Amino acid sequence: MSRSYAPSEDLAAYVRRHYVFEAQLPHDFVLIDKLLSETAILRVLLQGDWAAEMPSGEWSTFGPILLMGPNGIPWRVRVRGPFVVVGLAFRPCGWAGLFAEPARAIADNAAPMQTFWGELAERLYREVAAANDDDRIVKVIEEILRERLDVMRGPPPSVAMARFEDIARNDSTIHVAEAARQVGLSVRQFERHCYASFGHSPKVVLRRSRFLDMAQAMRGFSEPSAEHLAALRYFDQSHRNREFRHFFQLTPGQFEKATTPLFTAGLKLRADGLA
């Protein structure tokens, strides 16, 4: 079960959505899937055994409150038994208002949230864990976010990066130079801003978005027009295979047959405009 909530108006440039995920699975059930997130996500584990695979092959939980960076490559995650996770998806355009470190520092990685927010992260965990319903959970998180913004006194949300968020979601086949022109930056400035806000280069952001657009269509969550679907298609079969192997480590044919409950749930949220 996934429940999603829009942020308050004053936080809409910093937060994409709030989430509460529940899965009442059998205690001996083990689920391994992949995540491919376009944004950094705060995850608060309230119940269950939830872990991510490190490059060494070891599984790590990073503690009960962690920040998972945006992914340019798939990340294997494992869930054992029933779980409850509270999530918060950050918007790239507002990243600098909440974090002293550039998004590139956490891209394709994860770390305890205390690494970034110290005692404020500890408080966030305690108060979310004590909340007795979703409304209270969202209220607690937003109070902490406002406190963090007051402490940071950082730059306002980036208009250029907000524009690129929209471009990446709606025109994933655009060329980088044209996207830079549309947001009003030189290509070099554009790349620097993207690494700081998105954690990846503009090319990676667009490639990932294009893959996710196609994955949505293959899972039946979107009905792109014939023109848009044609634009999404890759140059040839080998190009398509390379992109699917890069972003999901499967061929398109294998992806169509694969059972991917966590990844598929994320695609559904994205198709519905909730991720």
Image (cartoon, rainbow, N blue to C red):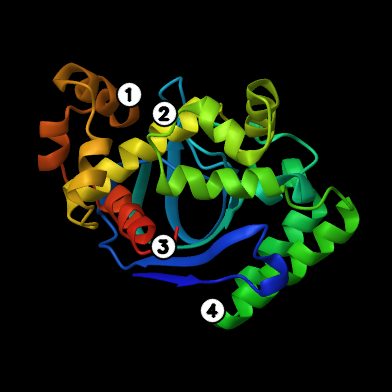
Q: Nearer the viewer, mark 3 or mark 4?
A: 3
Residue that mark 2 sits on: 73
Mark yes or no: residue 181 visible: yes
Cα separation, mark 4 vs mark 2, equals 31 Å
Q: Amino acid at mark 2?
A: Ile
Q: Amino acid at mark 3?
A: Gly
Residue ID at (72%, 34%): 102
Cα separation, mark 2 vs mark 1, equals 7 Å
Cα separation, mark 1 vs mark 4, equals 36 Å
Residue 273 badge = 3
Please determine whether, in this image, residue 157 is positioned above or below residue 241.
below
For marks 3 and 4, the one nearer the N-term is 4
User: Left or right: where does residue 97 sit relative to residue 196?
Assistant: right
Cα separation, mark 1 vs mark 3, equals 25 Å
User: Left or right: where does residue 120 sit relative to residue 248?
Assistant: right
Residue 134 badge = 4
Residue that mark 1 sits on: 246
The answer to whether the residue labelled 2 contacts the one labelled 1, judged by CB atoms less than 8 Å apart, is yes
Which quarter of the figure is the C terminus placed in?
A: bottom left
Q: Nearer the viewer, mark 4 or mark 2?
A: 2
